[in-house]
Amino acid sequence: MEAIATGIALFDSGPARFCQGRSHMGFGARGTGKSTLGLQFAYAGLGAGETVLYVCRERAEDLLELGKGLGFALDPYLDDDRLVLLQYDDQIQEIVTQRGFASVLEELCGEIEQRKIRRVILDPIDPFLSACSQEAEFRSQLRTISSRFEEIGWTSLLFASDAVARQPFALGLFSELCWGVFELRQDTGKNGQTTRWIHLHRMGDAELTQSQFAFRIDEGGVQIQASEPTGVAQPSFARFRRGAERGATEPILEPQIPEVERAAAAKASTGRGAGRARHSGTSSRALVLVVDDDSKVRIKVAQVMNQVAQVLGFQIRIAEAADGIQALRSAVAAKPDLVVSGVSMPRLDGIGLCRLLREHGADVPVLFLASRRSSAGERLRCFMVGGDEIVAKPFEPNELAGRVAEILRTRPPGSAIWPAINLKTARSKLGPRRIEPDHLGAHIALGVKHAREGNVGLYLVGYEFRFVDGNEGSAFVDRFFEGLCQQIRAEDALCPMSGPRIVVLLVDADEEIVRGVLGRIHERMVVEAAVALAGRRRVKPKALYRLLALSPPTVGCEVADGRFVETLFARPARLIEEDLQGRPGEPVEKYPLLESVYAALTRGDTHCASPRDGTSHELTYDPRTGVRSVVIGEYRYRTQDPNEESPAGTRAGRGAQLVWVEEDSDHHGPIARIEDGRVFRDDDV
C-alpha cells in the first residue's frame, strides 16, 4: 500500500508508516502533544499540495497560534481554502445525542467531499465515542467512522483523550479497526526532567523491533530523539579548514549567501576576533540580508536594492535566506547592515527572528515585509520585538527603495553592532522577550502607543507568589517562569521582579484570548508545584494574578503615564487555586488591609500597620473573653469569642482561626468574617 508523508521521521521512514486512505488512531493525556502531531500531519499534506480538514475542540485561533510557534505558516493555506478548520460546537455532545451519530458524521463527510479534501484530523474523536459505555456500541461507531473515511478514500488521523482510550475494550478495538495505533505519553523523573514518548501499538502489518521512542517538541514539531551512538570508530583523516581553531566545540556554519558575497564578507571581517562585537564606522558597501520563503519576493527585493545603490552611491550586496533559521545562520556569519524580512515563514518566522537578534544584543535595522491583509495587531507585534519599519507586500518598488535609503542614510554601512551569538544558545531561547525591570516601563509605553494607534488589544498580567511557611519555594517560581515562556509568543514579553513577582505583556490579545492563555498556564502550575516542591511538606505556595487592559483601556481604570506596574498591582487579585478548585469564600490575599489585620490579630501582635496609608493602629486584648480587636477607620476587627453562641464559634472550637468585621458605630452584627484565611460576606457571613 502507498505510504503517506506525515512530516515525522518515525512514520516517514522504516516500517512504521502511515498508509494512504486508511485510519490512524493516536491517544494520550492532555498536554502530551496530540495537537502538535496533528498540525505536523496537516502541514505535511499542505506542503504536498493537498487540501486538509482539521476538526478541533479548542479555539481555531489558538490552534493557529500553536502552529505559528512550531514554525508552521498556516495562514496562507487558510486564505486560499486549502486548509479548512472546523470547531466543534460547545454543545457537540448534546447535538450528537439529539440528532444521532450518523447524521452528524454525514454532515462532516459532506464538508469533506465538497472541498475535495485529502486528509482529515479529528482532534479529538471523543464527541462520537465518549457516550459509548458498551463495547458493541463503541465498536459500531468507530467502525462506521473509519469505514466511511476509507470509502471516500481519505487518510484520517483520529485523536482520542486518555479517558476514552482507557476504557477496557478501547485499545483492542483501536487495533482491530485502525491501520495504525500509537500512544503519546509524558513522564516526569525525580530530577524534574520531562520526557515524552511515542508508544507504537500497531502499524499495519509491520513487525516492529522497537515500540517506544522518545521525542521532544521543537520548531518543526515532533522531533524523535535518537539514542547516542556507541562504538564510533575514530576517523582516519581530518579535513583541514582555514580558520578552524584547535579545540573548537561549535561547528562552522556556512551562511546561506553566494560564494562571491561570502568572500567579500570574509574580506570585510578581516581583523575582527570571533567573539568581538562589530564596531561603529562607515563602509563604501552594504550587505543586506533578504529573508522570505517566496523566491520571487527575494528577487524583487534584490532589484530594489540595485535602485537604492544608485541613489546612495555605494555598492549593496545581497544575502538570501528562505526562512528564519537560515537567516539566523547567515546573520551570525555575515553580519549584515540591514535585514529585510517577511513576517510569516516556516520553521522560524520574521517576528521570532527579530526577537532573537534583539535578545542577543544585535543592533541592526530590521524592515518587515507584511501582507497587505495583515492586521494592525500583526504590525504591532513587529514593532514590539524591535522592528524598525514595516512595508506592505506586494510592495511598490519606489516605496521600498525610499524606506531602505532612509534607513541606510540614518544607519550607514558598518554601523550595525553584532555581538558574538552562539547559535545553539540562541535557538534554545525561542519564545517571548525577557525584559529587565529597569526597561519594563519603557517597553510597555511603546506597546501602549502603538496599540492605541491601531486599536489593538494589549494586556498586562501580574503574578505574585506567597509562601505561607517561608520563602523556600524559589524552585517553584523558577519553574513557573519557564512555563510562562513556553505558553506565550515571541512578540509578548515577561519580566521577573522582586517580591517575587512576574509581569507579562500580552500583545494583540482580547480578554477571551487572555483567559485561554491563563487557563493553560494555571493548569500547568499545579503540575509544576508538585514537581518543584516534592518532599517539602511545609511549603504551601499561593499564586495570585491580576489583569489590566491597557488597550483599549478599562473604563474607570485610567493609567497614569509611567505607572503601569503600580496600577496593575493595585488591581483586585485572583488566586490561581481559586480558579482551579472553586472553593467557597474568597482568599484574604485579595484584600491587603484584611490580610494585614488578620495576620496581626491571629499572631498576637501589639500593633497593625494599614497598607493603605502606612498608619499604625494599636491592638487591644480583653482577658475576660480572650478577644483581640483593632479599629481602623469606621470598621472594627475582632477575633472570635470562644464562648460566643454561633455556628462560627463551634468551628472555632475545632481550631479554626476567625476574625469578624463590624461597623464600629453599629451593633447589628458583623458584615464579614475571615475564617482560616478566607473571606465570607453578605449571605455567607
Image (cartoon, rainbow, N blue to C red):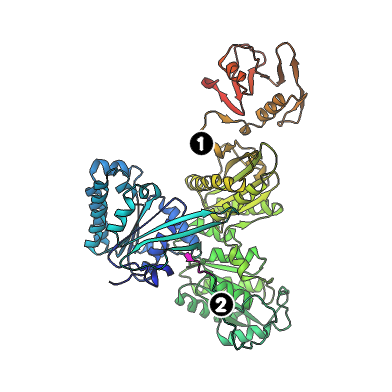
Task: Give residue 666's position: percent from left, percent from top.
Answer: 64, 12
Q: Quadrant of the C terminus?
A: top right
Q: Nearer the viewer, residue 434 or 467?
A: 467
Q: Nearer the viewer, residue 467 or 354?
A: 467
Residue 336, visible in the rendered structure: no
Label 2: element kind: loop
416 up-or-down from 62: above or below: below
Task: Give residue 8's position: percent from left, percent from top.
Answer: 42, 67
For the residue carrying disc 2, how many other residues have a C-alpha within 10 Å: few (<14), some (14-19), or many (20+)? few
Describe residue 584's horizontal placement relative to residue 677 as left or right. left
Q: Write the residue at 24% across / 64% down.
A: 153
For the residue carrying disc 1, how many other residues have a C-alpha within 10 Å: few (<14), some (14-19), or many (20+)? few
Task: From the image, tell me which residue sits under label 1.
Answer: 581
Task: From the image, tell me which residue sits under label 2.
Answer: 231
Q: Nearer the viewer, residue 547 or 644?
A: 644
Q: Nearer the viewer, residue 641 or 596?
A: 641
Q: Write the residue at 52% across / 51% down.
A: 456
Extent of the magenta region: 222-227
